Amino acid sequence: MLPRTIDWDTDRIVLVDQTALPDVRVTTVTSVDGLVDAIGRLVVRGAPALGVAGALGVVLATRTLSGPELDAACDRIAAARPTAANLAVG
């Protein structure tokens, strides 16, 4: 059975690496920096997937950040791929 394109597992985001297709390679993200890196490397592709990744990134950030630090993390997620409007909406 194939893994979900994006999944939440406890305190981490699990992504099917789109750059590896047609092979299946899973990338695990445990920080906002890791998510921003994965988005920049095109591990996550497609508007719906980017929206979900952005939303899960905010959830991940809320686990350890608050106030201005949380706002800054959300801004970094939204700016990870400037052409991806769904990151800011997700």
Image (cartoon, grey):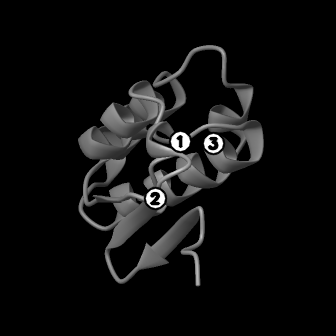
Which residue does the numbered mark 2 point to in the structure image? 15
Q: Are marks 2 and 1 in contact (CB under 8 Å)?
A: yes
Q: Secondary structure at mark 3?
A: helix
Residue depicted at x 66% and y 15%: 83
What kind of residue is marked 1? Answer: Val
Residue 16 screen position, x and y as percent: 48, 57
Residue 75 screen position, x and y as percent: 46, 29
Q: Are marks 3 and 1 in contact (CB under 8 Å)?
A: yes
Q: Can you say whether 51 is above or below 47 in the image?
A: below
Residue 68 screen position, x and y as percent: 32, 38
What kind of residue is marked 3? Answer: Leu
Residue 39 screen position, x and y as percent: 45, 34
Quadrant in the picture for residue 82 = top right
The residue carrying pointer 2 sits among few (fewer than 14), some (14 to 19) or many (20 or more) residues within 10 Å by Cα, namely: many
Instruction: Determine the CA span between mark 2 and mark 1.
Output: 7 Å
Determine whether, in the image, residue 71 is placed left or right of residue 68: right
Q: Are marks 2 and 3 in contact (CB under 8 Å)?
A: no
Pick out the residue farthest to the top.
82
User: Residue 50 got which mark?
Assistant: 3
Q: 77 or 3, which is in the foreground? A: 3
Residue depicted at x 26% and y 39%: 33
Q: Can you say whether 35 is above or below 31 in the image?
A: above
Q: Secondary structure at mark 1?
A: loop
Which tag, 2 or 3, sits closer to the chain's start?
2
Residue depicted at x 25% and y 60%: 30
Which residue does the numbered mark 1 point to in the structure image? 44
Q: Secondary structure at mark 2?
A: strand
Residue depicted at x 24% and y 62%: 64
Instruction: Determine the CA span between mark 2 and mark 3.
Output: 11 Å
Which tag, 2 or 1, sits closer to the chain's start?
2
What kind of residue is marked 2? Answer: Leu
